[in-house]
């Protein structure tokens, strides 16, 4: 299910022309990364979301399900001005809040929280948007 979730997250973000216009490109694609590491030559700003931070069994009496929490990192150059990273983070939150996510046997409605400040090095600034959803198996 992780690959299906990753694809659904990527498609929601890459399909939003406003968000794509705010990101740097990497090899002709928007700077949205869903692998374990971001390529070292990736330009900022970019988005990174890899794996689930929580995956809890959430079955009912008749229907097996899983409750998932996933973080989306928005990373930009540290310039002293937070407008760029906040604009992107707020767009990501807007895309995912109450979005329909096609994962599992039926669509799920997502809840997005944040953005919150991420702990980074001196040369970058980042925000995290957290997305929760439940899907049926």
Image: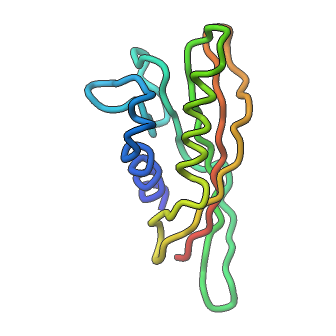
Left or right side of 16 for 80: right
Figure coloring: rainbow
Q: Quadrant of residue 126?
A: top right
- State the residue at coordinates (56%, 24%): 75
Q: Position of residue 107 (x, y in %)?
A: 49, 72
Judge whether 121 appears above or below 16 on screen.
Answer: above
- State the residue at coordinates (55%, 42%): 92
- State the residue at coordinates (60%, 35%): 89
Q: Position of residue 105 (x, y in %)?
A: 46, 77
Q: Residue furthest left?
A: 28
Left or right side of 47 for 87: right
Q: Position of residue 127 (x, y in %)?
A: 66, 30
Judge whether 42 appears above or below 127 on screen.
Answer: above
Judge whether 103 appears above or below 115 on screen.
Answer: below
User: Which of 111 and 86 lies nearest the eye of the viewer?
Assistant: 86
Q: Position of residue 49 (x, y in %)?
A: 53, 40
User: Which of 131 and 59 lies nearest the eye of the viewer?
Assistant: 131
Q: Quadrant of residue 68?
A: bottom right
- State the residue at coordinates (62%, 21%): 83
């Amino acid at each position: 299910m992780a690959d299906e979730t990753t694809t659904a997250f990527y498609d929601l973000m890459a399909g939003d022309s406003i968000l794509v216009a705010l990101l740097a490109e990497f090899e002709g694609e928007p700077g949205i990364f869903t692998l374990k590491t971001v390529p070292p030559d990736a330009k900022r700003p970019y988005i990174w979301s890899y794996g689930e931070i929580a995956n809890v069994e959430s079955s009912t009496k008749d229907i097996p399900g899983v409750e998932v929490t996933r973080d989306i990192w928005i990373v930009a150059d540290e310039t002293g001005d937070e407008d760029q990273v906040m604009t992107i983070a707020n767009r990501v939150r807007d895309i995912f809040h109450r979005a329909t996510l096609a994962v599992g046997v039926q669509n799920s409605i997502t809840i997005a929280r944040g953005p919150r400040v991420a702990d980074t090095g001196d040369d970058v600034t980042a925000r995290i948007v957290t997305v929760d959803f439940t899907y049926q198996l």
